[in-house]
Image (spheres, grey):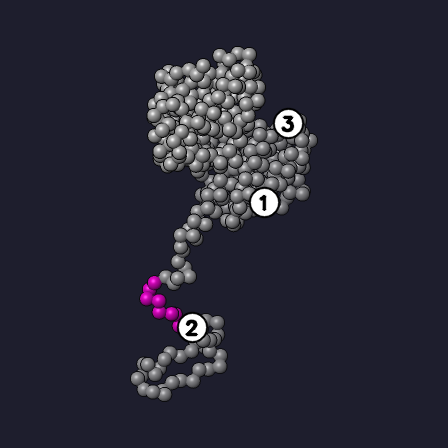
Amino acid sequence: MSSGGLELPPGDSGRDSGREGDSMEVPPSAVSLARPMDTGNQIGPELDWGSDAWREVRTRAQRAGRAYIWLNLVEQRLRAVVAAVLRPVYEPVHGEDWVVAAAGPAGQEWVQRAVAVREVSRRKGYLLDPADDNVLSFLTLPQLRELMVQHWPCFEPYFDDRRDVELALDELEVTRNVVSRNRALSQAVLSQAERAASRLLEILGADSDVPSSRRLPVDAVEDLVGDRYADVVGVHSDRVRLLGQFPAEDLFGEARRLDAIGIGLNLLVQNFSGRRLVRLAEAGCRVRLLFLNPASSAVRRRERELGLKKGELSRAVEMNILHMRRVRSRLRDPDAFEIQVFDETPRFTAYLVDGDGPDGIAIVQSYLRRTRGMEAPVLVLRGGGRVVKAGESGEHGLFATYREEFEAAWADSRPVS
């Protein structure tokens, strides 16, 4: 008899007694129990994850991790803003219960729930930091938003447009629900959440203090773990994907100094118009372009590596140099637009934008055998404003290395008349 009042079927008495036909009748109230399959103590194939399944899981985890960092930053910042604005209003009268008072009758249900969760966390030892032992730390993002909306006249002097704040929070709510339930997060939704979170942090007065964030905004992940990657803030499999995220206008459009070294400098010459270069130079940008000498033996070796016809690469480099000479000839101060050539074996191409100041970025590609520059991997480096963690030394990263290489090559090069 089972604990639920049902009879279990009898065992296989025939196997026990060894006599044929010696079986017991099964009562009508008995529950049939399925016998386990003999799998040889091996996990069945339905539980086995292949490479595709693991790849999908890692992708989900990576996206959820990025989204969680953004949501965490926004929630902490919003919590600090709510405390700074509402605490002085309610705490003098209500003391430690100022959050309960600020929630008012409309928020009694969720604020009491937060109080209950706080008490449970206290009993179970989940409060590891005394600074979190308050009701405000247990409010969720929608509840913090509700406090702002209810008391908007208190927040209005600090923000230009309430609609901007609410729209950004609306966009984040979709991501918050997906992450909290560990569901799949698409790249499109993640990108939308990152933009919304960045915008909201800017509205809430949490701008980055990294100078180069004007041209290359500091990513939340970089801000937290950027020390793991020196000053590398972006890696792209080829130049097409780089330009998809950072168009040439965004890279060079507001430069005050531009230093470039490579074989033909196609990223600049073919993606940034001569007219635009003229305006940039006339606005005060100082340009130094260092091409591989089209008449050098290094060009011929590179042609053989790429399987090009003899003279094909040298003519392309020569055309780029002639185009830059025409740009220089249209300037009132040609000395601010220098063109030189080098004869050494080319090892990399680099574009250093504002490389002498704290706002610099660099685009760097190594030359690979049998791979055109358009197809080579690209590194995006942050200059003097790279993120350095507290307690760490500000040792040179890759940006300084490539800047020194450029200066050394420039010193050994020859000017183009």
Q: Which disc number belongs to residue 332?
A: none
Is residue 36 found inside the magenta-colored segment of the image? yes
Residue at point 37%, 15% (across, down): 411
Identify the residue position indicated by label 3 in the image: 158
Which residue type does callout 2 highlight? Ala
Rendered position, 70 above or below 259: below
Q: Position of residue 54 (x, y in %)?
A: 42, 51
Identify the residue position indicated by label 1 in the image: 174
Residue 388 position by quadrant: top left
Mark 2 or 3, nearer chain start: 2
Q: Please count the marks in the image.
A: 3
- SS at circle 3: helix
On-image quarter of the C terminus: top left
- Front position among marks 1 and 2: 1
Q: Are marks 1 and 3 in contact (CB under 8 Å)?
A: no
Is 228 on the left or on the right of 189, as rendered? left
Which residue type does callout 1 highlight? Val
- Front position among marks 1 and 3: 1
Q: Predominant secondary structure in magenta?
A: loop
On-image quarter of the N terminus: bottom left
Q: Distance between the residues labelled 2 and 3?
A: 67 Å
Residue at point 61%, 37% (across, down): 168
Residue at point 58%, 45% (across, down): 174
What stretch of residues is rendered in magenta? 35-42
Q: How far apart are marks 1 and 3 (CA)?
A: 26 Å
Q: Are marks 2 and 3 in contact (CB under 8 Å)?
A: no
- SS at circle 2: loop
Q: How far apart are marks 1 and 2 (CA)?
A: 44 Å
Extreme residue in the front direction: 310
Extreme residue in the right direction: 153
Which residue type does callout 3 highlight? Tyr
Identify the residue position indicated by label 2 in the image: 34
